[in-house]
């Protein structure tokens, strides 16, 4: 039934060209020092092209929340994606766009399709506006900074005070929060 609903959405959105499904191989290297570069990558559910715009779609089984754009600068929006785990879908959307950007020359849109809410269609980041180069560059700078911080042995690790953030953490057993 889910597949039929996705196909119905696609028929309503046609014509478009599917560029790839479950795409791997896009990566971003973060230089930590002269000897170490950290690879950041992901598997992109879907890439298609419509009206000369590259569209990245991520399918989610749960919620998908983005930062509200009202009265916020690009810098404020990006900062919020790096600070608020509730908008992790938007963070992931920016990451995918940043990963594919060097490989395509067309504008990029990123959307989330929540499988439990297929009747609502795809929710597009930035209200459907293509991402600007300065937005993706700003995201990349912030990503590099946080990855370097993770690998910096001089930066102490502190557990979060917000226990709710631990609910789905893969490392909660290691740190003793279960």
Image (cartoon, helix red, strand yellow):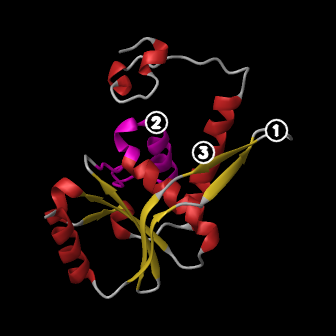
- Which of disc 2 and disc 3 is earlier in sequence? 2
Tag 1 residue? 33
**Residue 166 drawn at (x, y percent):** 38, 24
How many angstroms separate mark 3 from mark 2 (CA)?
12 Å
Q: Which mark is residue 83?
A: 2
Q: How many marks?
A: 3
**Residue 58 drawn at (x, y percent):** 37, 59
Give SS at disc 2: helix
Q: Residue furthest top?
A: 176
Tell which tag, 1 or 3, sits nearer the viewer: 1
How many angstroms separate mark 1 from mark 3 (CA)?
16 Å
- The residue at the point 34 percent across, 51 percent down is 66
Figure quadrant of the C terminus: top left
**Residue 14 drawn at (x, y percent):** 28, 85
- The residue at the point 52 percent across, 50 percent down is 75
**Residue 36 drawn at (x, y percent):** 79, 40
- The residue at the point 45 percent across, 48 percent down is 91
Depicted 144 relative to depicted 124: above or below: above
Q: Which residues are magenta?
A: 64-88
Give SS at disc 1: loop
Front-lying residue, 115 or 84? 115
How many angstroms separate mark 2 from mark 1 (CA)?
25 Å
Depicted 171 relative to depicted 176: above or below: below
Residue 153 located left or right of residue 80:
right
Tag 3 residue? 143
């Amino acid at each position: 039934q889910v597949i039929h609903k996705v196909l119905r959405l696609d028929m309503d959105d046609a014509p478009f060209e599917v560029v790839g499904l479950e795409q791997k191989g896009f990566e971003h290297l973060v230089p930590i020092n002269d000897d170490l570069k950290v690879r950041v990558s992901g598997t992109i559910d879907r890439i298609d092209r419509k009206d000369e715009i590259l569209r990245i779609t991520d399918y989610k089984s749960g919620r998908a929340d983005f930062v509200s754009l009202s009265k916020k600068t690009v810098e404020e929006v990006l900062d919020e994606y790096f600070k608020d785990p509730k908008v992790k879908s938007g963070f992931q959307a920016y990451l995918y766009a940043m990963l594919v950007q060097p490989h395509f020359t067309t504008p990029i849109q990123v959307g989330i399709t929540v499988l439990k809410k297929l009747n609502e269609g795809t929710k597009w980041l930035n209200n459907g506006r293509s991402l600007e180069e300065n937005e993706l560059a700003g995201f990349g700078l912030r990503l590099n900074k946080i990855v370097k911080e993770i690998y910096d042995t001089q930066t102490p690790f502190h557990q979060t005070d917000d226990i709710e953030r631990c609910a789905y953490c893969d490392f909660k057993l290691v740190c003793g929060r279960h």
